[in-house]
Image (cartoon, rainbow, N blue to C red):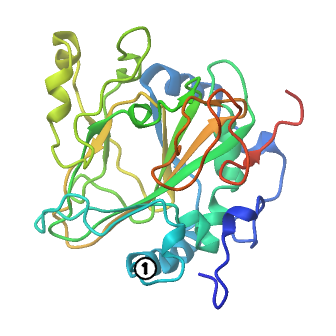
């Protein structure tokens, strides 16, 4: 976190450190055709190495500061959302924030990391590479023994104030993720579950705490196909998932914390579908029908040729 004067890192549309710098050509960072095909077939891919253990530890230093923030912190107003415990249940604690990329160097620079943005450019539109813009980040922490759940959901259910749906989520494990500590689970093929001509499933739990609530709005066929698959991630590995892939995670009953950072991207060219704030009460505003760009939505990876 910057000292003294409050600096809003949203104004820097480039890395401010060399923490995630890598050499080599983009081709060296491409996902194979088999992996890309798996993404479009199942709605997700997992166990993609994107960070070293040392890079994770650098992020965790800032993660600890993030968890220690309060409304009296001079940077607190830069956060989009801040929940010490989003569930409201002390026996199932879910720490969840949005906006730390504006406050901490490591979270800011991570959004530009080529090990993440280059593969992302392959997964925003089937059969085509796209330039990548930033949407927003999230941080999740489930403490040992009484960490909470993240209920089943589709990400785009929360993002319909943008169009078209060229979005992508990257979930990065900052600790080893196991079944015992609440690793991410996916429903294969659920990225094809839509309503009314392509709309996402409706949101049934804005606080994520009712794990199975989504089943109340599924069809019989979808309930029959509801087969959760865990993806156990090593520290520094990521899963990439489609904006309609149904996913969630159970509670942490292990002896250690389960922490993750999540990066949400969209393809350059996506437009605003709302005349209100696009991310909570952040002030991130683009007039309806206009291209999503500006200080809140920087271009993080640009193709040399479109």
Q: Residue at x 65, y 91 (%)?
A: 4
Q: Are there few (<14), some (14-19), or many (20+) residues within 10 Å of tag 1?
A: few
Dot 1 corresponds to which residue?
64
Q: x, y (%) of residue 165?
A: 55, 25
Q: Is residue 212 left or right of residue 36?
A: left
Say above or below: 302 vs 13: above
Q: x, y (%) of residue 265?
A: 59, 42
Say above or below: 213 vs 82: above
Q: Residue at x 41, y 80 (%)?
A: 69
Q: Residue at x 17, y 62 (%)?
A: 88
Residue farthest toward the right in the current orientation of the protein:
305
The quadrant in which the N terminus is found is bottom right
Q: x, y (%) of residue 98?
A: 46, 59
Question: Of helix, strand and loop, which one carries label 1?
Answer: helix
Q: Residue at x 59, y 64 (%)?
A: 101
Residue farthest toward the bottom in the current orientation of the protein:
4
> Would residue 21 be seen by someone viewing this image from the given angle?
no
Q: x, y (%) of residue 146?
A: 15, 67
Say above or below: 34 vs 29: above
């Amino acid at each position: 976190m910057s000292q003294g004067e409050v600096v809003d890192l949203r104004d820097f549309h480039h890395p401010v450190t060399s923490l995630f710098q890598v050499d080599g050509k983009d081709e060296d960072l491409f996902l194979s055709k088999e992996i890309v095909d798996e993404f479009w077939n199942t709605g997700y891919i997992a166990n993609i190495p994107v960070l070293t253990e040392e890079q994770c530890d650098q992020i965790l230093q800032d993660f600890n500061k993030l968890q220690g923030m309060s409304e009296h912190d001079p940077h607190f107003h830069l956060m989009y959302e801040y929940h010490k415990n989003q569930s409201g249940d002390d026996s199932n604690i879910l720490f969840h924030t949005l906006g730390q990329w504006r406050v901490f160097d490591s979270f800011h620079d991570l959004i530009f990391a080529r090990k993440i943005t280059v593969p992302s450019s392959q997964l925003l539109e089937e059969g085509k590479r796209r330039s990548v813009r930033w949407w927003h980040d999230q941080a999740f922490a489930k403490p040992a023994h009484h960490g909470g759940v993240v209920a089943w959901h589709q990400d785009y259910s929360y993002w319909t104030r943008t169009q078209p749906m060229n979005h992508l989520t990257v979930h990065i494990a900052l600790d080893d993720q196991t079944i015992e500590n609440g690793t991410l689970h996916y429903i294969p093929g659920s990225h094809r579950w839509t309503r009314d001509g392509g709309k996402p499933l409706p949101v049934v739990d804005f606080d994520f705490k009712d794990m199975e609530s989504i089943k109340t709005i599924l069809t019989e066929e979808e309930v029959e196909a509801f087969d959760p698959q865990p993806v156990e991630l090593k520290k520094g590995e990521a899963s990439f998932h489609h904006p309609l892939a149904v996913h969630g995670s159970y509670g942490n009953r292990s002896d250690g914390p389960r922490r993750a950072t999540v990066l949400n991207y969209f393809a350059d060219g996506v437009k605003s579908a709302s005349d209100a704030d696009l991310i909570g009460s952040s002030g991130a505003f683009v007039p309806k029908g206009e291209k999503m760009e500006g200080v809140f939505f920087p271009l993080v990876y640009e193709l040399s040729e479109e």
